[in-house]
């Protein structure tokens, strides 16, 4: 009888899921992650350096003697600003071909050489002081950064073990913020932020890229790329053993084999095919909405008003660089906190927190900025709110879309998904910068109200349609998605008859 009881119990209780091995941070993985992340440091560094000379060029415009000169310089200034995101968009389109043709590590190495060339062009532009040369260097450096913005997160997420994927997936944005902080520090007039030392300032990304070209060849290629896309199980096993410092990686090899079998219909995928692929349409829509919400959330408007708010508090102009530095440190701390808690709180919670807070702050900032002239203390409140906005945006909307893209797609379609996301990111970055400067002239502080419904719509889309992906393999996430979407559709269909019934009863009709 006891034996029978045990057999009955074993049938009644479902089998537990296999325990996924929790890998520790090995020296090889740590070295690969840190050196690869130098690409994100270059991203943040160049982002600051490229846009900060705008103030100097505006001074040139103010020094123009005639209205014709001012108009011409304003036009050239707008053109120089727009060439960087256009280059980023071009780089994002190129990156998809590079990562599939040359591998994740190969694409990273090629782009390191490109970064050295673009850095040399920026140095030459500061020495020659030819405006056409400056615009060409901005476009080429934009291409390099566009490639980095895709290759770095893609490579890091694919080599990361399951229990660290969330934390490692947020590292690119963490090191981007570190790059901004490094550029702000070096651009102080006491250091390299003067006319004589400007060539040295612009050469720093090239030095980082040179270091990468020396070290990156010793890194392993992405095991997922080797096994699933190149059908080379032996090299994939060796890469995993090197990354994990463990000979027994059979569990991960089996997971890769299962993913390879599950994605047979997605072989030879490219961006155009992905946009027209019926079974991946929901994932593509999610990528577009997440990236659109990221760029149209009002973060560019916040950066535009930051210095004005600090000056309105009575802060001396010479102290502004130190305040910007403190703000960057706060952003880095907030992203670090997100890295620590992402695998316990989950991706969805941080995204909802970010977009929810941005929605509220867009409304609050509009009211406060409009009333700011009535009380000086309101300027301090607005400065605090803007920093809170930047911190919550950094934790969710800025840092997580690249991670979500990687988790929603399997190996062969992942690079194409990154191209779609990168295109949306850089196009809307260009669009928001160009349009905001014109819209702000007419509606002023009310420009935040345009961003508020976009943040709210993104918030509700994530709440209703984006599943939680924490602690799940890529294949488990893929199997979960159709069920998750179907459940949402069934719930929606069940609510419709109830609404029709209530409407009919309200009108005094027979609901049957």
Image: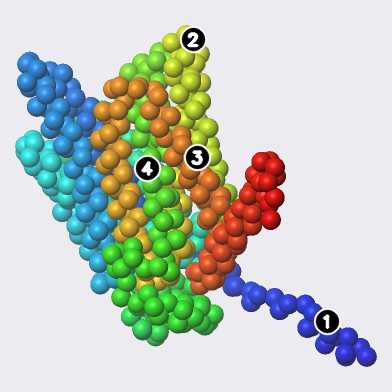
Figure quadrant of the C terminus: bottom right
For marks 3 and 4, the one nearer the N-term is 4
> Which quadrant of the figure has residue 82?
top left
Q: Secondary structure at mark 3?
A: helix
Of 452 and 325, the residue lying toward us: 452
Vertical relation: 133 (above or below) 472: above
CA gap, disc 3 and disc 4: 14 Å
CA gap, disc 1 and disc 4: 54 Å
For marks 4 and 2, the one nearer the N-term is 4
Q: Which mark is residue 375?
A: 2
Left or right: 402 with respect to 121?
right
Q: What residue is pinned by disc 4?
A: 295
Q: Which mark is residue 9?
A: 1
CA gap, disc 2 and disc 1: 71 Å
Vertical relation: 201 (above or below) 27: above
Of 275 and 233, the residue lying toward us: 275
Residue at the location (31% across, 44% down)? 428
Q: Please state which of the two labelled residues, at mark 1 or mark 3, is closer to the viewer.
A: 3
For marks 3 and 2, the one nearer the N-term is 2
Q: Please state which of the two labelled residues, at mark 3 or mark 4, is closer to the viewer.
A: 3
Crowding near pointer 1: few (<14 within 10 Å), some, many (20+)? few
Q: Secondary structure at mark 4?
A: helix
Q: Position of residue 132 (x, y in %)?
A: 7, 40
CA gap, disc 4 and disc 2: 32 Å
Crowding near pointer 4: few (<14 within 10 Å), some, many (20+)? many
Q: Position of residue 22 (x, y in %)?
A: 58, 69
Figure quadrant of the N terminus: bottom right
Q: Please state which of the two labelled residues, at mark 3 or mark 2, is closer to the viewer.
A: 3
For marks 1 and 3, the one nearer the N-term is 1
Crowding near pointer 2: few (<14 within 10 Å), some, many (20+)? few
Q: What residue is pinned by disc 3?
A: 456
Contact between marks 1 and 4 (CB within 8 A): the answer is no
């Amino acid at each position: 009888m006891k034996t029978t009881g045990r057999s009955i119990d074993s049938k009644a209780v479902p089998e537990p899921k296999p325990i996924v091995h929790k890998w520790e941070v090995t020296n090889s993985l740590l070295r690969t992650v840190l050196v690869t992340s130098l690409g994100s440091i270059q991203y943040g560094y160049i982002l600051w350096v490229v846009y900060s000379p705008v103030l100097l060029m505006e001074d040139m415009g103010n020094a123009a003697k005639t209205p014709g000169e001012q108009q011409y310089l304003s036009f050239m200034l707008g053109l120089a600003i727009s060439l960087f995101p256009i280059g980023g968009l071009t780089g994002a389109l190129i990156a998809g071909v590079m990562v599939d043709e040359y591998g994740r590590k190969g694409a990273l190495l090629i782009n390191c050489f490109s970064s050295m060339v673009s850095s040399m062009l920026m140095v030459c532009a500061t020495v020659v002081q030819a405006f056409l040369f400056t615009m060409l260097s901005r476009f080429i450096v934009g291409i390099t950064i566009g490639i980095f913005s895709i290759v770095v997160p893609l490579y890091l997420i694919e080599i990361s073990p399951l229990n660290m994927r969330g934390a490692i997936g947020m590292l690119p944005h963490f090191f981007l913020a570190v790059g901004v902080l490094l550029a702000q520090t070096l651009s102080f007039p006491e250091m390299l932020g003067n006319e004589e030392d400007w060539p040295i300032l612009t050469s720093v990304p090239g030095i980082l890229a040179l270091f990468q070209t020396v070290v990156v060849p010793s890194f392993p290629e992405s095991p997922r790329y080797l096994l699933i896309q190149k059908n080379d199980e032996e090299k994939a096993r060796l890469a995993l053993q090197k990354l994990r410092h463990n000979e027994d990686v059979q569990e991960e090899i089996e997971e890769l084999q299962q993913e390879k079998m599950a994605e047979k219909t997605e072989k030879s995928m490219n961006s155009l095919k992905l946009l027209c692929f019926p079974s991946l349409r929901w994932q593509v829509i999610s990528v577009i909405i997440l990236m659109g919400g990221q760029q149209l959330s009002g973060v560019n408007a916040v950066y535009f008003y930051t210095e004005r708010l600090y000056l309105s508090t009575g802060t001396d102009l010479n102290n502004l660089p130190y305040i910007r530095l403190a703000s960057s440190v706060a952003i880095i701390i907030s992203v670090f906190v997100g890295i620590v808690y992402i695998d316990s709180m989950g991706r969805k919670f941080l995204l909802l927190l970010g977009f929810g807070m941005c929605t509220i702050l867009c409304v609050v900032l509009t009211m406060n900025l409009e009333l700011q002239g009535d009380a000086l203390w309101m300027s301090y409140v607005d400065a605090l709110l803007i920093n809170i906005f930047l911190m919550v945006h950094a934790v969710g909307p800025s840092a997580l879309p690249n991670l979500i893209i990687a988790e929603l797609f399997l190996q062969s379609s992942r690079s194409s998904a990154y191209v779609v996301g990168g295109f949306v990111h850089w196009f809307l970055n260009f669009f928001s910068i160009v349009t905001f400067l014109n819209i702000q002239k007419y509606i002023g502080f009310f420009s935040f109200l345009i961003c508020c419904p976009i943040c709210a719509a993104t918030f509700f889309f994530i709440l209703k349609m984006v599943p939680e992906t924490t602690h799940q393999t890529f294949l488990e996430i893929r199997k979960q998605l159709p069920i998750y979407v179907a459940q949402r559709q069934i719930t929606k269909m069940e609510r419709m008859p109830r609404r029709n019934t209530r409407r009919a009863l309200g009108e005094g009709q027979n609901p049957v």
